[in-house]
Protein backbone atom coordinates (compact mmCIF):
# COMPACT_ATOMS: atom_id res chain seq x y z
CA UNK A 1 0.00 0.00 0.00
CA UNK A 2 1.49 3.33 -1.13
CA UNK A 3 0.96 6.72 0.47
CA UNK A 4 -1.48 7.70 -2.30
CA UNK A 5 -3.76 4.80 -1.32
CA UNK A 6 -4.05 5.86 2.32
CA UNK A 7 -5.97 9.18 2.24
CA UNK A 8 -9.29 7.80 0.88
CA UNK A 9 -9.31 5.14 3.57
CA UNK A 10 -8.28 7.57 6.31
CA UNK A 11 -11.08 9.97 5.37
CA UNK A 12 -13.58 7.16 5.91
CA UNK A 13 -11.94 5.92 9.14
CA UNK A 14 -11.71 9.43 10.64
CA UNK A 15 -15.42 9.30 11.43
CA UNK A 16 -15.96 5.52 11.54
CA UNK A 17 -13.52 4.82 14.41
CA UNK A 18 -14.71 7.67 16.68
CA UNK A 19 -18.30 6.65 15.98
CA UNK A 20 -17.73 3.04 17.00
CA UNK A 21 -16.00 4.13 20.21
CA UNK A 22 -18.78 6.61 21.03
CA UNK A 23 -21.40 3.85 20.84
CA UNK A 24 -19.94 2.14 23.94
CA UNK A 25 -19.33 5.29 26.00
CA UNK A 26 -21.52 5.82 29.09
CA UNK A 27 -23.77 8.87 28.85
CA UNK A 28 -21.84 10.70 31.58
CA UNK A 29 -18.57 10.65 29.57
CA UNK A 30 -19.41 14.01 28.03
CA UNK A 31 -15.83 15.28 27.72
CA UNK A 32 -14.48 12.18 25.98
CA UNK A 33 -17.46 12.00 23.63
CA UNK A 34 -17.03 15.65 22.70
CA UNK A 35 -13.28 15.19 22.16
CA UNK A 36 -13.83 12.18 19.89
CA UNK A 37 -16.47 14.01 17.85
CA UNK A 38 -14.34 17.10 17.36
CA UNK A 39 -11.11 15.18 16.73
CA UNK A 40 -12.75 13.11 14.00
CA UNK A 41 -14.31 16.14 12.33
CA UNK A 42 -11.08 18.18 12.46
CA UNK A 43 -8.99 15.27 11.13
CA UNK A 44 -11.39 14.72 8.24
CA UNK A 45 -11.29 18.41 7.36
CA UNK A 46 -7.47 18.44 7.45
CA UNK A 47 -7.24 15.34 5.24
CA UNK A 48 -9.68 16.89 2.79
CA UNK A 49 -7.57 20.05 2.56
CA UNK A 50 -4.51 17.92 1.80
CA UNK A 51 -6.37 16.05 -0.94
CA UNK A 52 -7.61 19.28 -2.50
CA UNK A 53 -4.04 20.44 -2.91
CA UNK A 54 -2.98 17.07 -4.35
CA UNK A 55 -5.81 16.68 -6.88
CA UNK A 56 -5.41 20.29 -8.03
CA UNK A 57 -1.78 19.45 -8.85
CA UNK A 58 -2.66 16.26 -10.73
CA UNK A 59 -2.19 13.69 -7.95
CA UNK A 60 -4.41 10.59 -7.93
CA UNK A 61 -5.51 8.80 -4.76
CA UNK A 62 -7.11 5.35 -4.79
CA UNK A 63 -7.67 2.45 -2.39
CA UNK A 64 -8.72 -0.95 -3.79
CA UNK A 65 -9.58 -4.21 -2.03
CA UNK A 66 -10.91 -7.43 -3.58
CA UNK A 67 -14.52 -7.86 -2.50
CA UNK A 68 -15.92 -10.70 -4.63
CA UNK A 69 -14.47 -12.55 -7.62
CA UNK A 70 -14.14 -9.93 -10.32
CA UNK A 71 -15.56 -7.21 -8.07
CA UNK A 72 -13.45 -4.72 -6.13
CA UNK A 73 -14.13 -2.31 -3.31
CA UNK A 74 -12.74 0.96 -4.66
CA UNK A 75 -12.28 4.33 -2.97
CA UNK A 76 -11.03 6.97 -5.37
CA UNK A 77 -10.49 10.68 -4.89
CA UNK A 78 -11.10 12.70 -8.02
CA UNK A 79 -12.23 16.31 -8.44
CA UNK A 80 -15.94 15.45 -8.30
CA UNK A 81 -15.49 13.32 -5.18
CA UNK A 82 -13.63 16.13 -3.45
CA UNK A 83 -16.41 18.61 -4.14
CA UNK A 84 -18.78 16.44 -2.10
CA UNK A 85 -16.17 15.41 0.50
CA UNK A 86 -15.22 19.04 1.14
CA UNK A 87 -18.85 20.02 1.64
CA UNK A 88 -19.44 17.03 3.93
CA UNK A 89 -16.33 17.47 6.08
CA UNK A 90 -16.75 21.24 6.50
CA UNK A 91 -20.42 21.07 7.39
CA UNK A 92 -19.92 18.00 9.57
CA UNK A 93 -17.54 20.01 11.75
CA UNK A 94 -20.08 22.84 12.02
CA UNK A 95 -22.95 20.42 12.70
CA UNK A 96 -20.92 18.56 15.33
CA UNK A 97 -20.38 21.75 17.32
CA UNK A 98 -24.06 22.65 16.89
CA UNK A 99 -25.26 19.17 17.93
CA UNK A 100 -23.06 19.16 21.06
CA UNK A 101 -24.79 22.33 22.23
CA UNK A 102 -28.25 21.35 21.03
CA UNK A 103 -28.24 17.94 22.76
CA UNK A 104 -26.43 19.03 25.94
CA UNK A 105 -29.16 17.79 28.27
CA UNK A 106 -30.80 15.24 25.97
CA UNK A 107 -30.84 11.48 26.63
CA UNK A 108 -29.13 8.83 24.48
CA UNK A 109 -26.33 11.11 23.28
CA UNK A 110 -23.85 8.29 22.74
CA UNK A 111 -26.33 6.51 20.51
CA UNK A 112 -27.04 9.72 18.62
CA UNK A 113 -23.42 10.67 17.99
CA UNK A 114 -22.50 7.10 17.12
CA UNK A 115 -25.05 6.96 14.32
CA UNK A 116 -24.25 10.57 13.45
CA UNK A 117 -20.64 9.54 12.78
CA UNK A 118 -21.72 6.46 10.79
CA UNK A 119 -23.94 8.69 8.68
CA UNK A 120 -21.03 10.95 7.74
CA UNK A 121 -18.82 7.89 7.14
CA UNK A 122 -21.35 6.59 4.64
CA UNK A 123 -21.60 10.00 2.99
CA UNK A 124 -17.87 10.37 2.36
CA UNK A 125 -17.82 6.73 1.23
CA UNK A 126 -20.46 7.54 -1.39
CA UNK A 127 -18.44 10.57 -2.47
CA UNK A 128 -15.23 8.54 -2.90
CA UNK A 129 -16.77 5.39 -4.41
CA UNK A 130 -14.85 4.35 -7.51
CA UNK A 131 -17.53 2.04 -8.85
CA UNK A 132 -21.25 1.33 -8.57
CA UNK A 133 -20.79 -1.59 -6.19
CA UNK A 134 -18.89 0.48 -3.61
CA UNK A 135 -21.37 3.32 -3.98
CA UNK A 136 -24.30 0.95 -3.39
CA UNK A 137 -22.73 -0.49 -0.22
CA UNK A 138 -22.27 2.95 1.32
CA UNK A 139 -25.68 4.07 0.04
CA UNK A 140 -27.38 1.30 2.01
CA UNK A 141 -25.23 1.98 5.08
CA UNK A 142 -26.47 5.56 4.86
CA UNK A 143 -30.08 4.34 5.00
CA UNK A 144 -29.38 2.16 8.04
CA UNK A 145 -27.47 4.88 9.89
CA UNK A 146 -29.96 7.71 9.27
CA UNK A 147 -33.07 5.79 10.34
CA UNK A 148 -32.05 5.82 14.07
CA UNK A 149 -31.44 9.57 13.79
CA UNK A 150 -34.88 10.21 12.33
CA UNK A 151 -36.57 8.21 15.14
CA UNK A 152 -34.15 9.43 17.84
CA UNK A 153 -36.81 11.11 19.99
CA UNK A 154 -38.86 7.92 20.14
CA UNK A 155 -42.22 9.69 19.92
CA UNK A 156 -45.14 8.29 17.94
CA UNK A 157 -44.56 10.97 15.29
CA UNK A 158 -40.85 10.13 15.08
CA UNK A 159 -41.50 6.40 14.76
CA UNK A 160 -44.13 7.04 12.08
CA UNK A 161 -41.66 9.24 10.18
CA UNK A 162 -39.06 6.49 10.41
CA UNK A 163 -41.47 3.93 8.96
CA UNK A 164 -42.28 6.29 6.11
CA UNK A 165 -38.59 6.82 5.45
CA UNK A 166 -38.00 3.07 5.21
CA UNK A 167 -41.06 2.57 2.99
CA UNK A 168 -39.41 4.87 0.47
CA UNK A 169 -35.74 3.98 1.03
CA UNK A 170 -35.95 0.18 0.92
CA UNK A 171 -37.74 -0.08 -2.47
CA UNK A 172 -35.44 2.66 -3.75
CA UNK A 173 -32.39 0.66 -2.73
CA UNK A 174 -33.87 -2.47 -4.34
CA UNK A 175 -34.46 -0.62 -7.63
CA UNK A 176 -30.90 0.68 -7.53
CA UNK A 177 -29.51 -2.82 -6.94
CA UNK A 178 -31.51 -4.30 -9.81
CA UNK A 179 -30.29 -1.54 -12.12
CA UNK A 180 -26.66 -2.06 -11.10
CA UNK A 181 -26.78 -5.86 -11.50
CA UNK A 182 -28.60 -5.62 -14.84
CA UNK A 183 -26.07 -3.08 -16.11
CA UNK A 184 -23.23 -5.38 -15.04
CA UNK A 185 -24.80 -8.25 -17.00
CA UNK A 186 -25.13 -6.05 -20.09
CA UNK A 187 -21.85 -4.12 -19.90
CA UNK A 188 -19.65 -6.23 -17.62
CA UNK A 189 -18.49 -3.26 -15.57
CA UNK A 190 -19.17 -1.44 -12.31
CA UNK A 191 -16.47 1.21 -12.74
CA UNK A 192 -16.76 4.97 -13.04
CA UNK A 193 -14.85 6.43 -15.98
CA UNK A 194 -14.23 10.15 -16.25
CA UNK A 195 -14.37 11.89 -19.63
CA UNK A 196 -16.90 9.82 -21.51
CA UNK A 197 -18.35 7.23 -19.13
CA UNK A 198 -17.86 3.48 -18.86
CA UNK A 199 -20.28 2.24 -21.55
CA UNK A 200 -18.70 3.34 -24.82
CA UNK A 201 -17.99 -0.33 -25.70
CA UNK A 202 -21.64 -1.41 -25.45
CA UNK A 203 -23.33 -2.00 -28.81
CA UNK A 204 -26.58 -0.38 -30.03
CA UNK A 205 -28.48 -3.65 -29.60
CA UNK A 206 -28.55 -2.97 -25.84
CA UNK A 207 -30.26 0.44 -26.03
CA UNK A 208 -33.48 -0.74 -24.39
CA UNK A 209 -31.62 -2.46 -21.54
CA UNK A 210 -29.38 0.56 -21.00
CA UNK A 211 -32.41 2.84 -20.86
CA UNK A 212 -34.15 0.56 -18.36
CA UNK A 213 -31.03 0.41 -16.17
CA UNK A 214 -30.81 4.20 -16.24
CA UNK A 215 -34.42 4.53 -15.13
CA UNK A 216 -33.94 2.03 -12.29
CA UNK A 217 -30.75 3.64 -11.01
CA UNK A 218 -32.01 7.21 -11.25
CA UNK A 219 -35.23 6.09 -9.56
CA UNK A 220 -33.22 4.48 -6.75
CA UNK A 221 -31.10 7.58 -6.24
CA UNK A 222 -34.15 9.79 -6.80
CA UNK A 223 -35.74 8.56 -3.57
CA UNK A 224 -33.02 10.12 -1.44
CA UNK A 225 -32.81 13.10 -3.83
CA UNK A 226 -36.55 13.66 -3.11
CA UNK A 227 -37.56 13.80 -6.77
CA UNK A 228 -41.30 13.88 -7.31
CA UNK A 229 -43.05 11.45 -6.73
CA UNK A 230 -40.45 9.98 -4.33
CA UNK A 231 -40.33 13.01 -2.02
CA UNK A 232 -42.97 12.19 0.60
CA UNK A 233 -40.56 10.95 3.27
CA UNK A 234 -38.61 14.20 3.56
CA UNK A 235 -41.20 16.58 5.09
CA UNK A 236 -42.26 13.84 7.53
CA UNK A 237 -38.66 13.42 8.71
CA UNK A 238 -38.74 16.98 10.09
CA UNK A 239 -39.80 15.58 13.47
CA UNK A 240 -36.12 14.73 14.00
CA UNK A 241 -33.87 17.07 16.06
CA UNK A 242 -32.55 20.16 14.23
CA UNK A 243 -28.99 18.78 13.79
CA UNK A 244 -30.50 15.73 12.04
CA UNK A 245 -32.63 17.93 9.80
CA UNK A 246 -29.55 19.93 8.91
CA UNK A 247 -27.63 16.74 8.18
CA UNK A 248 -30.42 15.29 6.01
CA UNK A 249 -30.90 18.44 3.94
CA UNK A 250 -27.41 19.81 3.53
CA UNK A 251 -24.78 17.12 4.01
CA UNK A 252 -25.91 13.53 3.79
CA UNK A 253 -29.08 11.89 2.49
CA UNK A 254 -30.51 14.18 -0.17
CA UNK A 255 -27.05 15.11 -1.43
CA UNK A 256 -26.13 11.42 -1.70
CA UNK A 257 -29.09 10.89 -4.00
CA UNK A 258 -28.23 13.87 -6.19
CA UNK A 259 -24.56 12.91 -6.26
CA UNK A 260 -25.46 9.36 -7.32
CA UNK A 261 -27.42 10.73 -10.29
CA UNK A 262 -24.42 12.88 -11.26
CA UNK A 263 -22.18 9.80 -11.23
CA UNK A 264 -24.62 7.77 -13.34
CA UNK A 265 -25.05 10.48 -15.97
CA UNK A 266 -21.41 11.47 -16.36
CA UNK A 267 -19.19 8.64 -15.16
CA UNK A 268 -21.28 5.57 -16.02
CA UNK A 269 -23.20 6.53 -19.15
CA UNK A 270 -21.31 9.62 -20.22
CA UNK A 271 -23.23 12.66 -21.37
CA UNK A 272 -23.04 11.74 -25.09
CA UNK A 273 -24.59 8.30 -24.59
CA UNK A 274 -27.18 9.69 -22.15
CA UNK A 275 -28.26 12.26 -24.72
CA UNK A 276 -28.28 9.64 -27.49
CA UNK A 277 -30.52 7.35 -25.42
CA UNK A 278 -32.94 10.23 -24.91
CA UNK A 279 -32.93 10.01 -21.11
CA UNK A 280 -31.63 13.49 -20.29
CA UNK A 281 -34.66 15.46 -21.48
CA UNK A 282 -37.18 13.46 -19.36
CA UNK A 283 -34.81 13.83 -16.40
CA UNK A 284 -34.67 17.60 -16.94
CA UNK A 285 -38.48 17.78 -17.14
CA UNK A 286 -38.83 15.72 -13.95
CA UNK A 287 -36.35 18.03 -12.19
CA UNK A 288 -38.29 21.09 -13.39
CA UNK A 289 -41.58 19.64 -12.15
CA UNK A 290 -39.97 18.93 -8.77
CA UNK A 291 -38.59 22.48 -8.57
CA UNK A 292 -42.01 24.05 -9.11
CA UNK A 293 -43.94 21.51 -7.02
CA UNK A 294 -41.63 21.91 -4.03
CA UNK A 295 -41.94 25.69 -4.15
CA UNK A 296 -45.73 25.60 -4.41
CA UNK A 297 -46.01 23.19 -1.47
CA UNK A 298 -43.63 25.33 0.60
CA UNK A 299 -46.07 28.22 0.25
CA UNK A 300 -48.74 26.22 2.08
CA UNK A 301 -46.69 25.42 5.22
CA UNK A 302 -46.89 27.33 8.49
CA UNK A 303 -44.49 24.96 10.26
CA UNK A 304 -41.04 26.47 9.66
CA UNK A 305 -39.13 23.20 9.23
CA UNK A 306 -41.75 21.79 6.86
CA UNK A 307 -41.52 24.93 4.72
CA UNK A 308 -37.76 24.50 4.62
CA UNK A 309 -38.21 20.81 3.76
CA UNK A 310 -40.33 21.54 0.71
CA UNK A 311 -37.82 24.24 -0.21
CA UNK A 312 -35.14 21.53 -0.18
CA UNK A 313 -37.23 19.35 -2.50
CA UNK A 314 -37.31 22.27 -4.92
CA UNK A 315 -33.75 23.49 -4.57
CA UNK A 316 -32.10 20.09 -4.75
CA UNK A 317 -33.49 19.51 -8.23
CA UNK A 318 -31.49 22.49 -9.49
CA UNK A 319 -28.48 20.15 -9.29
CA UNK A 320 -30.21 17.44 -11.31
CA UNK A 321 -31.54 19.97 -13.81
CA UNK A 322 -28.03 21.30 -14.48
CA UNK A 323 -26.67 17.79 -15.04
CA UNK A 324 -29.60 16.77 -17.26
CA UNK A 325 -29.00 19.73 -19.60
CA UNK A 326 -25.70 18.03 -20.53
CA UNK A 327 -23.77 21.18 -21.35
CA UNK A 328 -20.59 22.56 -19.77
CA UNK A 329 -22.06 25.79 -18.39
CA UNK A 330 -25.19 24.15 -17.00
CA UNK A 331 -23.03 21.41 -15.48
CA UNK A 332 -21.05 24.05 -13.62
CA UNK A 333 -24.31 25.53 -12.33
CA UNK A 334 -25.60 22.15 -11.16
CA UNK A 335 -22.36 21.11 -9.49
CA UNK A 336 -21.75 24.40 -7.71
CA UNK A 337 -25.33 24.33 -6.41
CA UNK A 338 -24.50 21.05 -4.66
CA UNK A 339 -22.24 23.15 -2.42
CA UNK A 340 -24.21 26.38 -2.41
CA UNK A 341 -27.52 24.75 -1.51
CA UNK A 342 -25.76 22.85 1.28
CA UNK A 343 -24.28 25.87 3.03
CA UNK A 344 -27.42 27.98 2.63
CA UNK A 345 -29.87 25.26 3.70
CA UNK A 346 -27.85 24.19 6.73
CA UNK A 347 -27.87 27.84 7.82
CA UNK A 348 -31.66 27.93 7.61
CA UNK A 349 -32.08 24.73 9.62
CA UNK A 350 -29.58 25.87 12.24
CA UNK A 351 -31.59 29.07 12.58
CA UNK A 352 -34.84 27.11 12.87
CA UNK A 353 -33.25 25.05 15.63
CA UNK A 354 -32.10 28.18 17.47
CA UNK A 355 -35.58 29.68 17.35
CA UNK A 356 -37.13 26.46 18.64
CA UNK A 357 -34.60 25.89 21.41
CA UNK A 358 -34.41 29.49 22.61
CA UNK A 359 -37.93 30.83 22.16
CA UNK A 360 -40.03 27.74 21.48
CA UNK A 361 -40.84 29.00 17.96
CA UNK A 362 -41.85 26.28 15.51
CA UNK A 363 -44.32 28.10 13.28
CA UNK A 364 -43.95 31.09 10.99
CA UNK A 365 -47.05 32.64 12.57
CA UNK A 366 -45.12 32.77 15.88
CA UNK A 367 -42.11 34.70 14.49
CA UNK A 368 -43.32 38.28 15.01
CA UNK A 369 -40.42 40.34 16.36
CA UNK A 370 -37.93 37.45 16.37
CA UNK A 371 -35.35 39.58 14.54
CA UNK A 372 -35.14 42.05 17.42
CA UNK A 373 -34.88 39.31 20.05
CA UNK A 374 -32.36 37.17 18.09
CA UNK A 375 -30.67 39.54 15.61
CA UNK A 376 -27.66 37.36 14.78
CA UNK A 377 -29.76 34.28 14.13
CA UNK A 378 -32.24 36.16 11.96
CA UNK A 379 -29.46 38.02 10.12
CA UNK A 380 -27.98 34.64 9.19
CA UNK A 381 -31.45 33.40 8.18
CA UNK A 382 -31.89 36.50 6.02
CA UNK A 383 -28.60 35.94 4.17
CA UNK A 384 -29.45 32.32 3.44
CA UNK A 385 -33.05 33.11 2.43
CA UNK A 386 -31.89 35.79 0.01
CA UNK A 387 -29.46 33.27 -1.45
CA UNK A 388 -32.30 30.79 -1.95
CA UNK A 389 -34.19 33.46 -3.85
CA UNK A 390 -31.18 33.94 -6.12
CA UNK A 391 -30.42 37.46 -4.90
CA UNK A 392 -26.83 38.73 -5.43
CA UNK A 393 -24.25 38.61 -3.99
CA UNK A 394 -25.17 35.44 -2.04
CA UNK A 395 -24.09 32.02 -3.36
CA UNK A 396 -27.51 31.07 -4.77
CA UNK A 397 -27.29 33.83 -7.38
CA UNK A 398 -24.15 32.24 -8.86
CA UNK A 399 -25.86 28.85 -9.21
CA UNK A 400 -28.96 30.24 -10.88
CA UNK A 401 -26.93 32.47 -13.22
CA UNK A 402 -24.91 29.55 -14.54
CA UNK A 403 -28.00 27.35 -14.82
CA UNK A 404 -29.82 30.03 -16.79
CA UNK A 405 -26.90 30.83 -19.10
CA UNK A 406 -26.22 27.11 -19.51
CA UNK A 407 -29.83 26.45 -20.45
CA UNK A 408 -29.72 29.14 -23.12
CA UNK A 409 -26.40 27.79 -24.42
CA UNK A 410 -28.01 24.34 -24.68
CA UNK A 411 -31.01 25.74 -26.54
CA UNK A 412 -33.39 25.04 -23.63
CA UNK A 413 -34.97 28.44 -23.06
CA UNK A 414 -37.91 26.93 -21.18
CA UNK A 415 -35.55 26.23 -18.29
CA UNK A 416 -35.04 29.96 -17.77
CA UNK A 417 -38.80 30.35 -17.32
CA UNK A 418 -38.72 27.58 -14.70
CA UNK A 419 -35.83 29.23 -12.86
CA UNK A 420 -37.48 32.66 -12.86
CA UNK A 421 -40.78 31.19 -11.66
CA UNK A 422 -38.98 29.28 -8.91
CA UNK A 423 -37.15 32.42 -7.77
CA UNK A 424 -40.45 34.31 -7.61
CA UNK A 425 -42.03 31.51 -5.58
CA UNK A 426 -38.98 31.39 -3.28
CA UNK A 427 -39.41 35.10 -2.63
CA UNK A 428 -43.10 34.56 -1.98
CA UNK A 429 -42.49 32.05 0.80
CA UNK A 430 -39.32 33.54 2.32
CA UNK A 431 -40.09 37.29 2.34
CA UNK A 432 -43.13 36.98 4.66
CA UNK A 433 -40.90 35.20 7.18
CA UNK A 434 -38.37 38.03 7.05
CA UNK A 435 -41.11 40.67 7.29
CA UNK A 436 -42.60 39.04 10.37
CA UNK A 437 -39.25 38.65 12.06
CA UNK A 438 -37.92 42.14 11.41
CA UNK A 439 -40.89 44.47 10.96
CA UNK A 440 -43.90 43.03 12.81
CA UNK A 441 -44.00 44.10 16.51
CA UNK A 442 -44.33 41.43 19.18
CA UNK A 443 -47.70 41.64 20.95
CA UNK A 444 -47.43 38.72 23.37
CA UNK A 445 -45.01 36.37 25.11
CA UNK A 446 -42.84 33.90 23.24
CA UNK A 447 -44.13 30.31 23.14
CA UNK A 448 -41.34 29.20 25.49
CA UNK A 449 -39.06 32.08 26.45
CA UNK A 450 -35.34 31.29 26.68
CA UNK A 451 -35.53 27.61 27.74
CA UNK A 452 -32.24 28.11 29.58
CA UNK A 453 -30.32 28.74 26.35
CA UNK A 454 -29.43 32.42 26.45
CA UNK A 455 -26.40 33.01 28.65
CA UNK A 456 -24.31 36.01 27.57
CA UNK A 457 -25.56 35.86 24.01
CA UNK A 458 -28.97 35.64 22.34
CA UNK A 459 -28.64 31.85 22.58
CA UNK A 460 -26.02 29.23 23.47
CA UNK A 461 -22.78 30.15 21.71
CA UNK A 462 -22.42 26.58 20.40
CA UNK A 463 -25.72 27.12 18.57
CA UNK A 464 -24.95 30.64 17.43
CA UNK A 465 -21.36 30.15 16.20
CA UNK A 466 -22.15 27.55 13.49
CA UNK A 467 -25.04 29.71 12.24
CA UNK A 468 -22.82 32.75 11.76
CA UNK A 469 -20.09 30.60 10.19
CA UNK A 470 -22.31 28.97 7.55
CA UNK A 471 -24.04 32.28 6.77
CA UNK A 472 -20.61 33.83 6.21
CA UNK A 473 -19.72 30.92 3.90
CA UNK A 474 -22.94 31.53 1.93
CA UNK A 475 -21.96 35.15 1.43
CA UNK A 476 -18.28 34.45 0.74
CA UNK A 477 -19.11 31.79 -1.88
CA UNK A 478 -20.92 34.50 -3.84
CA UNK A 479 -18.53 37.41 -3.27
CA UNK A 480 -15.39 35.33 -3.97
CA UNK A 481 -16.82 33.18 -6.76
CA UNK A 482 -14.14 34.38 -9.19
CA UNK A 483 -11.34 32.67 -7.25
CA UNK A 484 -10.01 29.29 -8.43
CA UNK A 485 -10.34 27.99 -4.87
CA UNK A 486 -14.05 28.85 -4.67
CA UNK A 487 -16.80 26.24 -5.16
CA UNK A 488 -17.44 27.80 -8.57
CA UNK A 489 -13.76 27.55 -9.51
CA UNK A 490 -13.64 23.89 -8.48
CA UNK A 491 -16.88 23.15 -10.39
CA UNK A 492 -15.31 24.66 -13.51
CA UNK A 493 -12.31 22.41 -12.94
CA UNK A 494 -14.63 19.36 -12.91
CA UNK A 495 -16.54 20.50 -15.98
CA UNK A 496 -13.31 20.93 -17.92
CA UNK A 497 -12.61 17.24 -17.31
CA UNK A 498 -16.13 16.15 -18.32
CA UNK A 499 -16.13 18.38 -21.43
CA UNK A 500 -12.48 18.40 -22.63
Image (cartoon, grey):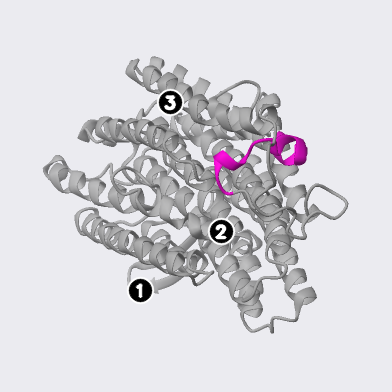
Which quarter of the figure has residue 124? bottom right
Q: Dot 3: few (<14), some (14–19), or many (≥20) neighbours within 10 Å?
A: many
Examine the rendered structure and indicate whether residue 181 appears above or below residue 278. Answer: below
The residue wearing badge 1 is 68
The residue wearing badge 2 is 244
Q: Secondary structure at mark 1?
A: strand
Residue at position x 55%, y 24% from top?
390
Residue 180 image position (x, y, % from top left): 28, 58
Q: Is residue 47 left or right of residue 60?
A: right
- Judge by depth and name the residue closer to the eye, 456 or 149: 456
Callout in the foreground (1, 3): 3
Mark earlier in primary sequence (1, 3): 1
The residue wearing badge 3 is 422
Q: Which residues are magenta?
A: 362-379
Q: Are marks 2 and 3 in contact (CB under 8 Å)?
A: no
Q: Give the Cα distance between marks 2 and 3.
A: 26 Å
Q: Dot 2: few (<14), some (14–19), or many (≥20) neighbours within 10 Å?
A: many
Amino acid sequence: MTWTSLPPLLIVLSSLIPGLIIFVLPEERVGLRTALNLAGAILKTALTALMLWGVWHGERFETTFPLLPGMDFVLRIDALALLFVTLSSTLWLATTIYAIGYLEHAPHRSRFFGFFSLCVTATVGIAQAGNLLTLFLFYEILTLSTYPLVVHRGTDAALAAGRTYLRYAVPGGAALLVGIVWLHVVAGTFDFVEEGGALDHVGPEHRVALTACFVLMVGGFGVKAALVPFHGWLPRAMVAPAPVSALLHAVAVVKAGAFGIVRVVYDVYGQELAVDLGVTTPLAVLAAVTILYGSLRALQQDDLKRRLAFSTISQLSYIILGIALAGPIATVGGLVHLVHQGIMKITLFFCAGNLAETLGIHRISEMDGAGRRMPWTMAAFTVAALGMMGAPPVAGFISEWYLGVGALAAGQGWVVVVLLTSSALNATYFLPILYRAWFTPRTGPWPDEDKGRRGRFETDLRLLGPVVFTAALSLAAGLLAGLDASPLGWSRFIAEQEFP
